[in-house]
Amino acid sequence: MKTVHNELVRPRQEIIDAFVAMTREYSPSCLVADSTARVGVIGGLRPVKREHKIAGPALTVQLQADELVDCLPVLGTAKPGDIIVVACQRSPRLAMWGGLMSTLSQMAGIAGAVIDGMVRDVDEVRDLDFPVWYHGTLPRRCPAITHDGTEPLQTNVPVVIEGQVIEPGDIIVADENGLGIVSPSVAQTVLDDTRELLGRENVIRDKIIAGATLHELLAEFGAL
């Protein structure tokens, strides 16, 4: 694998802001997954805190499973609100994220990280209140960063996690249910669908609280 560094093309800020606002709702990843548009989903990753909910553009990092290197240099290209997505092929050999990387990311305004592999310092990351989704934990750190220890590494290239392709700039919506992956090309459709779905669910919820039966709800709404 050769080293590649591409510029990240981010969605319009008003689109990003609308998805960030969605994280104030219950289960935002489920909301986007219920859209009529084609939305990718990823399950099985653990959040450091169950209450964490984030949304933002994916800054993707591709690592080679048999030659893992420190991904710290990606912070030089990240901007506030980005979500760093590290594809390290679920390698069980090294932890690819930890407390110092979380602290640096938090200070840079990064919204969170998705690590397709192992992490460490989970107690520190939890105390920092920095959102990270990960597969597992391992005490062994990744190779220390040196002048010649950061290659091969590819940034802002398509990556695959759990069979789901994530393109650089895709909007990640993450919570304890999993991740929704929204292409900027369908982002407005997903937002419109989500607003309609929220309104419908609020009406149904109010009717349930008011005493409506399942039969009555199905007669009125067709499906729940």
Image (cartoon, helix red, strand yellow):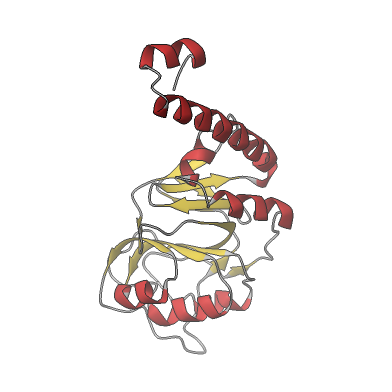
Q: Taking the image as drawn, is residue 120 in sight?
A: no
Asked which quadrant contains residue 9, the reply is bottom right
Q: Which percent across, then down, holds residue 143? A: 38, 81
Q: Which percent across, then down, holds residue 187? A: 66, 43
Q: Which percent across, then down, holds residue 222? A: 48, 14
Q: Is residue 18 left or right of residue 67?
A: right
Identify the residue at horizontal 26%, vertical 71% (top origin).
Answer: 138
Identify the residue at horizontal 25%, vertical 77% (top origin).
Answer: 139
Identify the residue at horizontal 66%, vertical 55% (top origin).
Answer: 17
Q: Which percent across, then down, holds residue 76? A: 61, 78
Q: Quadrant of the C terminus?
A: top left
Q: How many marks?
A: 0
Q: Is residue 35 above or below residue 43?
A: above
Foreground residue among 13 and 38: 13
Q: Residue farthest to the front?
A: 210
Q: Is residue 164 above or below residue 123?
A: above
Foreground residue among 97 and 150: 97
Q: Taking the image as drawn, is residue 135 in sight?
A: yes
Q: Is residue 187 above or below residue 102?
A: above
Asked which quadrant contains residue 122, the reply is bottom left
Q: Is residue 42 above or below residue 102?
A: above
Q: Is residue 166 left or right of residue 51?
A: right
Foreground residue among 207 and 66: 207
Identify the residue at horizontal 36%, vertical 76% (top origin).
Answer: 127
